[in-house]
Image (tube, coloured by chain):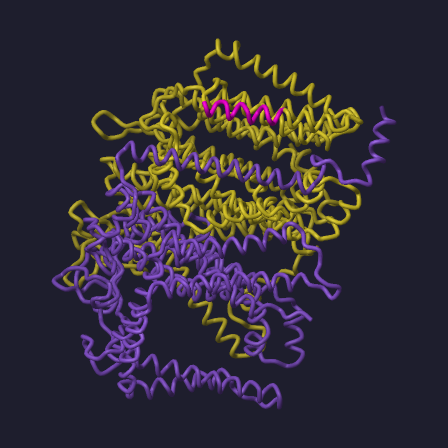
Chain colours: A yellow, B purple
Amino acid sequence: MSDLLSSEIDLEKVLAGADEELAVRPDEPSLPPLEWAGKNLFGTGQGSIGAIVRGTFLTVIFAGLALLAYRAVLNFIFSENAGWDSVRINLRLLFTQAYPDENYTRVWVTVGVVAVLAGLSLGMTKVGPGFSFKRIATWLFSWGGLIVLGVLLREPSVLTDSNGETRFADSRGVELVRDTNNSLVYQNNDPAPSTGISALRENFGAAMGDRLGWWIIGLALLAIGAAIWFVLGDLRRRTTFVPAIPLALAGIGLLVSTTWWYRWGHYTFTEEGGFEYGPGELVATSTRIPWTIMFVLLVVAYLGGRLLARATASGPIRIGLSAAWLLAPFFTYYAILRGPIMDWAHVVSTDLPLWVLFAGLGGALLWLLTRPGLGEIGRILAVVVLAAAAFTWVGAFFGWFSMLQKVRLSVLFLGLTALLAPNFIGEARQRMKLVVGWVGFITIFHLLVTLINTASSIETPSEDFAGGFMVTIYVALFTMLFSFPLGVLLALARTSRMPLFRVMATVYIEAFRGVPLITMLFFFTVFVNIFLPGSMELSLMAAVTIAFVLFSAAYLAENVRGGMQAIRRGQYEASDALGLTTVQRTGFIVLPQALRVSIPPLVGQTIATFKETSLLAIVGVFDFLRMARDVVPAQTEFLGTRKPGLLFISAVYFIGAYAMSKYSQRLEKKLGVGER
Amino acid sequence: MSDTAQETLVTTASQRPPFYRDATVVKWIAQVATLVVVLFALIFLALQAGDNVSAKGIKTGFDFLDVDPGINLNGTIDNDPDTGGRALWAGMVNTLRLSIGGIVAATLLGILVGVTRLSKNWMASKVASVFIEYMRNIPLLVHIILFFAIMQTAPSFSDDVGPLNGWVHFSNKGVSVPRVFQADGFYQWLTFLLIGAVVGNLVRRRQQRVQDETGATTYPLGSLVAVIAVFGVIGWFLHPLFGWLDGVFSTIAEAVDKIPQAAMQIALTVLAVVLAVNWIRRFLNSRRTPAGLAKLTDDDWFRMIFAGVGAAIAAAVIWVVWPGGSSWLINSTRDLFEVASDKFGAGRDSWQNDRPLGAARPDFAEGRFANPGSAGLNFSAGFAAVFFGIVLYTAAFIAEIVRGGILAVPKGQTEAAQAIGLRRATMLRRVILPQAFRVSLPPLGNQYLNLTKNTSLAIAVGASELVQVGQTIGNQTGKNLEVFAIWMLFYLACSLTISVVVNFFNVRLAIVER
């Protein structure tokens, strides 16, 4: 492990300014605390009284605002009847809805797949040097300070009893009442009346005793921070970094370890309508062991990833990993979470032969078509295949003959790929690329069609077999995966010099961007069945995913178009001078550059989609927000308790979106957008 | 074989390529084929919809606009609408209220937060950035529902609920603040202000010219404000002087009413044709080089034909598809002027008849939460949650845009301003902010569009606006498609309006390159 740690600290990378902002900038000379406070809080050092008055005024105003807000939040979080039990007990419901207990292992397998992929990716990415001790010390110090401040700030809790009357309790939970002077006293008038700071002064011992845990944590963080700051002070050189990923892993490990001493979600509802502590009968529905396994998987995958990255060339592994990430949503959703009931007879009799046919014959056809010196025959053949594909559709429309949808689509794809073939004419290696690509594509495509068409064995109360946070994540993932190609196509069409394509793309993009997402969701969930033939019906999940894909594609197209406009004219002229075809120019010159420029807005669009999935709650999908807004408050134990759940899901959304936006900022810096 | 290939290559080099190699032909074939497929799919879906609708026995059509929908709204101009059209109109008014109020409030708050985030003061900038990160990393819908939940657990509604007793109320029923309303004579007074603005603008331009030519320090903006203020003060007392305007407006309304429908149709057709011809002429001019007309690509031809087809379609709509449109236009113009004449008419019923403006405290008639507009300004809980939700959320984005805009001003500009000895305030006002504004205007326009569309989230908390009203009506009458069409038209119109306004300023602010 120490070997790995030290290998993270790469002086050359640090000096080259690979990633971390601290490495890029030379350390600013740090001011002594008092001087820093004077300069940044009270406007000293500018030599004018006005600056001092202004600075102090601003500090007082904003510090007051911050303290008030902090106190309000604390008072809610720690108030005795905030109802946090409603979150703690319903964690499983919030994340996976009523996914059946006996199948719960599938959920953990899904999480495990993600953990392994994440560990491998983390192990293989070259992350910057990490965090300096100084920065870590500052973090620890400020968190410790915040916690201590919180313990000091907390006022007696405000309670509302079942009659709707307001009652008060001090920080120990002992009840206070209002006396004739309207000040708070203990019920038996024993201790002195107390509010706010005076309560704290008078009940200091009690408050300390009550919040002893928090005191210890806060003070310990302060002490560790101070120790790092002062003891390692002479190490404050640029090279003393703690690598980021092991630090993050340690953090996750700490979080996982809490499941061993805190009762997260370890509850089962009893017959009488209450709930009791207990892991349930199944290991899968508990938290300790599964999360520990996940953590171990993550760490092992991380170490494995590091070894792999060292042992072999990174190119193929990277491609494999990207492909695994792209496929993971489909695989986990359709193959694991749904528990598909495979019709093996059908698979053997139909699916496999079809796959062999398309992969083998199609691959051979493409191999032939990419032979040099074939002339026009290739194009003519491709057009013939396309015509055949079109004919199968027309035939199916008029009901002349029946044919599997999969076959029709496959023929169509084969024709389109054959049209692309002339771009790959060349040596055997070049030709092989197209064939391998085709075989890979048809494999995945056939697998997906089979999986999607296979019935699910999971029985849940609602139509969907995934709910809660799971549905949020999956809709966001599928949306991004499908809307990306569509968005790129639309962007190409909109910037094309072919007028009809341009008009169609413009109409589409502007129509979808002009209306609110919620109306589109209504359209696809409520009205869309009017447009479909009688036998067809869209499931709710499919309908909302289509709505999201179409909507998001319009926005993505605009982002990509922005990236295309950043490409200089010279690039087009140079590719024309080289004699590249339009397809080659688009695929090898224009799109790579355009996509690179538009990565930050694309990440922004991903964040937006992630947040917009909350709209699912309005159209009747049991997503994360719906759980917290409707389902949990409907339980008899927590009737009407909304705020804790909403705050909790806010925190989860925040973590997701904030992490992505930070990532996008780093990416932006790395790509040097706007600096070239 | 290669020899023959060579030969064919040589022989065909001088001729046109065969049609399947001719880029123009292939491109057109691809486009037309795609268009046909798309049209075919759309027609198929439309036919299917027709079948399904008739099978279910639903009648399509917009007649529901004239029928009593039997629904109750909350917090609108008309909570018990007589017709479906009226209900949708009430929803639209609420959407516009939310949007316009939201845009104004979010812009002000956003600029404040953005500037605070750039403050040298550590505390101020930290508080601002915590606010921004909190707001924009959590879905707007979660914010709205959380605000709604908080409001529902606020103190119960009563006359003396705080925080400012009698003036500002915050209760589980909503938020109430005092309201400024226009009383009798308001529009006459507004006319004074308008004249003041025109005169003030003349003064401003004159002062600006003097400053530009002689370098003397004048105060163009200051004098504009001063002139308007003087006119405002005069108008406050002399506003009855413009009472005769209602006669003018009613005369115009009568005159408009007498225009025959055919005349209107002819005028509109002429307008469409003139616009198309003008556009084509200007387009051709733009393609004209000193060496004569440049060779037109088929894309250029398409554009011109498209303009012509547009005019033809407009004519078809005017004469064949919707001949009633012209009389509708005449009627609404007449109505508009009648409303204007009504505004200027005397004897409007209000509390203070002698002042253009009055103010009213929130008033709880018979212990009930009043409708907005009857006394104070009352936001019902849902409305307040949506309003504050979209304002705070959009303000966070606007703050980032403002910050980005200010940071985008090159450092050399600041240094140059300091070098010529400008004071800090002047530097900000004259050098930095104008340039920052230019950078941030397009994304700002985008945020305004988003805000307008986000008002539709009010449906989650049951506040009446267009989408919520439309959804209710659609559920009751089964006219979901018609309602959807109205939604699309309305929001597209809003988007278009905002785009036009933002573009107008964008063009004016753009750098004039030489």
Magenta segment: does it hold A637?
no
Q: Quadrant of residue A438?
A: top right
Q: Is residue B482 above or below residue A634?
A: below
User: Magenta span: helix, strand or loop, mainly?
Assistant: helix
Q: Position of residue A247 (x, y in %)?
A: 58, 40
Magenta segment: does it hold A395?
yes
Q: Residue at x 51, y 86 (%)?
A: B219
Q: Residue furthest right?
A: B3
Residue B444 visible somewhere in the drawing: yes
Q: Is residue A657 above or below residue B259?
A: above
Q: Residue at x 61, y 80 (%)?
A: B422
Q: Quadrant of residue B474?
A: top left
| Residue B370 located left or right of residue B423 | left
Q: Position of residue A357 (x, y in %)?
A: 61, 15
Q: Specify the segment rendered in magenta.
A: A385-398
Q: Quadrant of the C terminus of chain A?
A: bottom right
Q: Position of residue B34 (x, y in %)?
A: 56, 38
Q: Position of residue B277 (x, y in %)?
A: 55, 62
Of residues A604 and A521, the one drawn nearer to the viewer in this rendering: A521
Residue A152 visible somewhere in the drawing: no
| Residue B191 located left or right of residue A190 | right
